[in-house]
Image: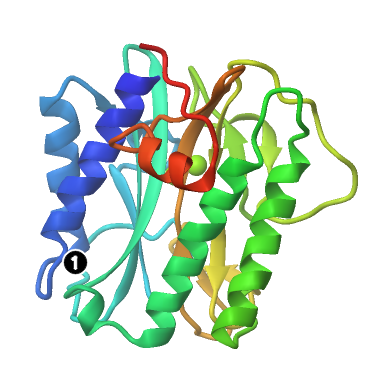
Amino acid sequence: MRAAGLLVGQTLAAVAAAIADGITTGQLDALAEDFIRSHGGRPSFQEVPGYRHTLCTSVNEEIVHGIPGARVLRDGDLISVDCGAIVSGWHGDAAISAIVGGDAAGRPEDLALSRATEASLWAGIGAMRVGGRLYAVGEAIEASILASGERDGREYGIVEEYVGHAIGQEMHLDPQIPNYGVQGKGPILANGFTGALEPMITLGSPDNRVLDDDWTVVTIDGFRASHWEHTVAIRDGGAWVLTALDGGEAKLTELGIPYAPIR
Ligand code: MG
Ligand code: MG
């Protein structure tokens, strides 16, 4: 799974480097497909029934599942890119958010939203430990979003209809991993559990709907959204962020979470 996760991380880095004013989301998708195939992987999203692209590209008020195509990106757009790959039968799944034209081109509230969303993802990762309970992840994500909202003077929305998931030889496995606090504690996390955490956070209400293309999820109020995702393994010794280029070592260390790769 590290091979698949690393390939997803590298693909997202290549896509991030290509995001610029004037490029289309379809061009980003082609770049990602070439990158994955030329490195010995398969784009997993193409194997989801009814979907034929390598990425989901969700721009501005689009939350998740945006379809790559003719849309031209413009400076200041807030885009999330979600990518999945299969290597030797194992899956990786991750998403990033970015401002087209770089942070200097972004609206302050979009930058704050993206940072809050990414921070909440890492808070969720920090709540994953062997012997712990699955729903602690959503509680940590929600607490992080609330704290960021207080700091930023905003009331961020947490999307509830789309959630994280266990992952392995298929992309979407049970159990689901809510990105918010729910009743109960959830299953006990076992040594070797692998999950994809993926908070989707909005600047306004989290209420959403699916466009007529049957895929793209947008906010109803038109406010922008951010989405960050990592595939994470937890082991007796700590965590290993399989889709992070460095395995998560730098960020885990910063957060005081033991970094536990298989070497
Ligand atoms: Mg994903
Ligand atoms: Mg996912």
Number of callouts: 1
Identify which residue, 210 or 197, lies in the foreground. 197
Q: Is residue 12 above or below residue 189?
A: below
**Rendered view: 39 above or below 219:** above
User: Residue shown at 50%/85% (left/top)?
Assistant: 222
Q: Is residue 226 above or below residue 89?
A: below
Q: Nearer the viewer, residue 105 or 39?
A: 105
Q: Which quadrant of the view contains residue 24?
A: bottom left
Work out whether residue 8 can be spotted.
yes
Q: Residue 51 placed where, x, y %?
A: 38, 43
- Location of residue 112 in the rendering, given as x and y in whole percent from the top left corner: 44, 77
Quarter of the view holding residue 101: bottom left
Dot 1: within a 10 Å radius of its alpha carbon, few (fewer than 14), some, or many (20 or more) residues?
Answer: few
Residue at image coords 46%, 29%: 259
Residue at image mark 1: 70
Q: In the rendered image, which quarter is residue 135 located in?
A: top right
Left or right, 123 with respect to 88, comes to: right
Q: Position of residue 210 (x, y in %)?
A: 54, 66
Q: Residue 49: percent from the left, percent from the top?
A: 45, 36
- Secondary element at image label 1: loop
**Residue found farthest to the right:** 184
Residue 198 in view (yes/no): no
Describe residue 85's horizontal placement relative to residue 64 as left or right: left
Q: What sort of colour scheme is used for the picture?
A: rainbow
Mark 1: C-beta under 8 Å from nearest atom of ligand 1:
no
The C terminus sits in image quarter: top left
Between residues 121 and 26, which one lies in front from this camera angle? Answer: 121
Q: Residue at x 40, y 19 (%)?
A: 1
Q: Give the residue type at disc 1.
A: Ala
178 displayed left or right of 39: right
From the viewer's perspective, is 34 left or right of 92?
left
